[in-house]
């Protein structure tokens, strides 16, 4: 297969310092695994082909790619003999590859697509053999250093552990992201040895080799040095996540979103937020969540794969795969589980749990209710303590509540059952038969009074005394 522009993403390392059964690349950071962010950045420069080099835990990485980037090809690097060896393995699998080859590391999730685009543009315009993306950092520890001559021309890269004292002082580092000419890359990779401190084949040696073979090489320096930060352990994962959080929040605030406390507002890179949304402190928005304008979210709210309509309000609540309609009100302390759908202006209040429930326009369940496998008609009123008993121990059943129906407090609707349009259910009822439109369903024992029971059975208690006082007072006022 021949290609004008392709990307190779190195993801064969396990990342032992993560101390994890999961490969480093698959650790999650604001909506995507580390590798997912790099894939997203490379997608933006429009390569004809994307190759991911897998090795350690290849099955897990491949499973992720099948799901998240089915167009990406994988190449197995059975033994991790170095970054140069990894690229060579990829090129060997695609012997006809031509044009520009972008190489990026799967563990640098903060790399911006704009920087990658600039790298490719400079590379292709200057017709350099190699263009490396570099950064000026305060602490270059662990990174390869970019060695330049007195005119500023790039000479080579030297790895931290192979560097001498003067090279260690260099603050321009190799990001691990490059654009190569495919043909020259292939030629130079064939010359790589592993005569270095790690005994590995270093991709970085291609810079010097290409230059010595008479090819022009160069660098593009990124403006924002955080873009090149890699992730080696979980402390770094946390600090990268913090940087990405600030980036996402800054973008959103610039676009017209208000955040009372950006530091406690965690919005996945995959989430969409319209202008004029207001976030109170302590909000997490995950996955495919989308929030329309004028909505107010938080404090202390987690929404996953949830759609929030314009001007809806969600207070101290938890929702997963829910659809909250325009102007609807949720919480405080509501739990909307999968396939909960609140139509416009519906209201779900404190300690109400919903699941697979279709709640009609303007319907209300203000306190302490469970609505599961249910349809609630427009403007229906669900009293405090109402339960749809949807599970018979074996199967789930549906409850249908009609438009403007009124379900009295503490009622149990034993599914399958329906309450018709405009029907009432008396408080404390256990409804097992359908209630027809306009009827009142009552299903509870009649109240009886055992006269003087306390005086007989609880004589001398404070209840008895209180009752006597009440009777005396009543006696005085009657007289
Ligand atoms: C590499 C660069 C260094 C640069 C740094 C930026 C080399 C020799 N050094 O160092 O100059 O400053 O990145 O982060 O390239 N990988 C494979 N197969 C292998 C070895 C590595 O796929 O055989 C993958 C790793 O999974 C990782 C990436 O390549 O995603 C970089 O490898 P790593 O070992 O982390 O290189 P660094 O030491 O960070
Ligand atoms: Ca690294």
Image: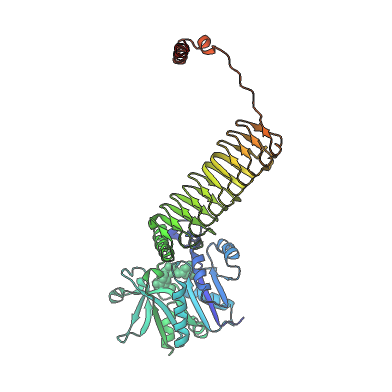
Q: Is residue 387 above or below residue 103?
A: above
Farthest residue toward the front? 479
Q: Is residue 105 above or below residue 17?
A: below
Closer-to-camera residue (446/190): 446
x then y, percent, for residue 142: 36, 68
Q: Quadrant of ligand 1?
A: bottom left
Whether residue 281 can be seen here: yes
Q: Residue at x 44, y 70 (%)?
A: 111
Q: Please name the colour scheme applied to the rendered image.
A: rainbow
Q: Is residue 57 left or right of residue 165?
A: right
x then y, percent, for residue 186: 52, 82
Q: Residue at x 43, y 67 (%)?
A: 110
Q: Quadrant of residue 415?
A: top right
Whether residue 29 can be seen here: no
x then y, percent, for residue 112: 45, 71
Q: Is residue 146 left or right of residue 444?
A: left
x then y, percent, for residue 301: 47, 50
Q: Report how many numbered discs are placed on residues in the image.
A: 0
Closer-to-camera residue (205/360): 360
Closer-to-camera residue (57/226): 226
Q: Is residue 23 above or below residue 339?
A: below
Q: Residue at x 43, y 50 (%)?
A: 299
Q: Is residue 203 above or below residue 341?
A: below
Closer-to-camera residue (170/375): 375
Give the position of the N terminus as an image quadrant: bottom right
């Amino acid at each position: 297969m021949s290609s004008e522009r392709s990307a190779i993403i190195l993801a064969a390392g396990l990342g032992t310092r993560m101390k994890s059964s999961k490969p480093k690349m698959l650790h999650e950071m604001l909506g995507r695994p580390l590798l997912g962010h790099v894939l997203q950045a490379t997608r933006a420069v429009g390569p004809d082909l994307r190759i991911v080099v897998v090795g350690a835990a290849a099955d897990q990485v491949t499973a992720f790619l099948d799901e998240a980037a089915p167009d990406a090809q994988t190449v197995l690097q059975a033994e991790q003999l170095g970054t140069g060896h990894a690229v060579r393995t990829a090129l060997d699998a695609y012997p006809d590859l031509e044009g520009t080859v972008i190489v990026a590391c799967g563990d640098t999730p903060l790399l911006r697509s704009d920087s990658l685009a600039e790298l490719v543009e400079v590379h292709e315009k200057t017709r350099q053999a190699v263009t490396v993306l570099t950064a000026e950092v305060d602490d270059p520890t662990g990174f390869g250093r970019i060695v330049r001559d007195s005119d500023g021309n790039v000479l080579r890269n030297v790895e931290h552990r192979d560097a001498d004292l003067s090279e260690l002082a260099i603050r321009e580092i190799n990001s691990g992201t490059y654009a190569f000419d495919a043909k020259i890359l292939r030629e130079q990779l064939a010359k790589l040895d592993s005569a270095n401190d790690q005994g590995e084949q270093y991709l970085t040696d291609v810079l010097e080799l290409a230059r010595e073979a008479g090819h022009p090489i160069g660098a593009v320096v990124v403006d924002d040095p955080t873009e090149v930060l890699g992730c080696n352990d979980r402390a770094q994962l946390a600090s990268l996540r913090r940087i990405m959080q600030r980036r996402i929040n800054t973008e959103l605030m610039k676009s017209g979103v208000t955040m009372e406390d950006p530091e406690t507002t965690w919005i996945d890179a995959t989430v969409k937020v319209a202008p004029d949304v207001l976030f109170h402190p302590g909000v997490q928005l995950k996955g495919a969540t989308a929030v329309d304008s004028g909505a107010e979210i938080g404090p202390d709210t987690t929404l996953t794969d949830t759609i929030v309509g314009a001007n809806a309000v969600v207070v101290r609540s938890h929702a997963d795969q829910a659809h909250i309609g325009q102007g609807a009100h949720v919480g405080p302390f509501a739990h909307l589980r999968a396939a909960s759908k609140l139509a416009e202006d519906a209201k779900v209040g404190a300690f109400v749990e919903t699941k697979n429930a279709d709640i009609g326009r303007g319907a209300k369940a203000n306190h302490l209710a469970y609505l599961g496998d249910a349809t609630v008609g427009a403007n229906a009123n669900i009293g405090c303590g109402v339960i749809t008993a949807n599970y018979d121990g074996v199967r789930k059943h549906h409850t249908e509540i009609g438009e403007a129906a009124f379900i009295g407090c503490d009622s149990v609707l034993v599914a399958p059952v329906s309450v018709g349009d405009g029907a009432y259910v008396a408080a404390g009822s256990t409804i097992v038969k359908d209630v027809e439109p306009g009827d009142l369903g009552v299903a509870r024992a009649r109240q009886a009074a055992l006269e003087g029971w306390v005086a007989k059975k609880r004589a001398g208690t404070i209840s008895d005394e209180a009752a006597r006082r009440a009777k005396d007072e009543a006696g005085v006022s009657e007289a």
